[in-house]
Amino acid sequence: MSRPGPKIPPLSVTDAQRAALEGWVRRRSTAQTLALRSRIVLESAEGHSIAEVSRRLGIAPETVRTWRRRFLDRGLEGMHDDPRPGVPRKITDADVERVIVKTLEERPKNATHWSTRSMAAATGMSQSAISRIWRAFALAPHCSQTFKLSTDPLFIDKVRDVVGLYLDPPEKALVLCVDEKSQIQALDRSQPVLPMMPGVPERRSHDYIRAGTTTLFAALEVASGKVIGSLHRRHRAAEFKKFLAKVDKEVPADLEVHLILDNYATHKTPDVKKWLLAHPRFHLHFTPTSSSWLNLVERWFAELTQKKLKHGVHRSVQALERDIRAWLADWNEHPRPFVWTKTADEILDKVAAYCNRISDSGH
């Protein structure tokens, strides 16, 4: 006659435990092992036997028995794996704090910033440990960024004015971002450029031959991305006035013209002011001082520099100007507007927050 097996204690769950277990089962982010253990407990709480739960979930009876017992002994905490034995931490929280404090508040002897080697020597830790700590806390002592804050007393008003034109332009008007890229150099390398090959980047000599300079006046149409451009060998008020005349000629006569531009002296001479008085449809909106980032045409100049000028070779100013005109014509065939998204309030809040962060640095 066979002996009966050990009596299995009943398993029940509270409402709070059931909600937690069902949540683990439903959530896609839950680990599969935790979801399975939760289902074992929920099935058992319905009164199903070990054999029945084993069959329904397709697992071994011993697995059901183990996690029933864990839940009965330890509740929800028992559903998680126990910490595994292993090598104890060699780097303590105090070590990490010491590295961070030294990185932020101290300088090494005879150097302006820490390296992993110098920090390792100062703390007695390995370079790899220092590197891991710096990565974990996004510390990069070797990196440095520059900044410049505008001291324009009308900074807030000018930001609101310019951003307002970007986000809510007036009707029956054209908004143009205007500036000049001066002193564009026609450069030829002292030796022929060696073309790129598999595994070898393009190579060019360090020294170059100057062939002269030109200046590009540009007006970027905010809505469409098209650009009105004009090249001149000089960039005085006289050339700027000629450029304004070109803009006046190319913009339909029934539209008002709003120009966003910087505070360069050639934009404010008596001759320019006289021309503007004779052309009342032109309205000038000046960006704050030291705030070229607010003028979208600077973004277009960056495209020109990166895609045409930076790696170009020009043996004469005429060749340089031909290249720029060709690039400008191609851009206007497939214009791409630069879309402004931040509101004036968002910009001003960010500037204010940054000023608060550096308020102790003397700026």
Image: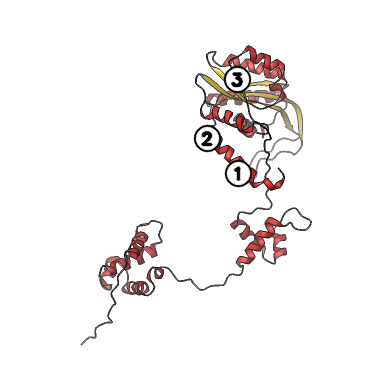
The amino acid at mark 3 is His
- In the picture, the quarter occupied by the N terminus is bottom left
Mark 3 against mark 1, which lies toward the viewer? 1
Q: Which residue is identified by label 1?
A: 353
Q: Secondary structure at mark 1?
A: helix
Q: Which residue is identified by label 3?
A: 283
Left or right of 161? Residue 145 is right
Report the Cα–Cα distance between label 1 and label 2: 19 Å
Report the Cα–Cα distance between label 3 and label 1: 32 Å
> As rendered, which of 302 and 72 lies closer to the eye?
72
Task: Please say if 105 is above or below 145.
Answer: below
Q: Which residue is identified by label 2?
A: 341
Label annotation for residue 323: none
**Residue 119 x %, y %:** 70, 61
Q: Residue at x 67, y 59 (%)?
A: 101
Direction left: furthest residue: 1
**Residue 264 x %, y %:** 70, 26
Report the Cα–Cα distance between label 2 and label 3: 23 Å
Sequence-wise, the earlier of marks 3 and 1 is 3
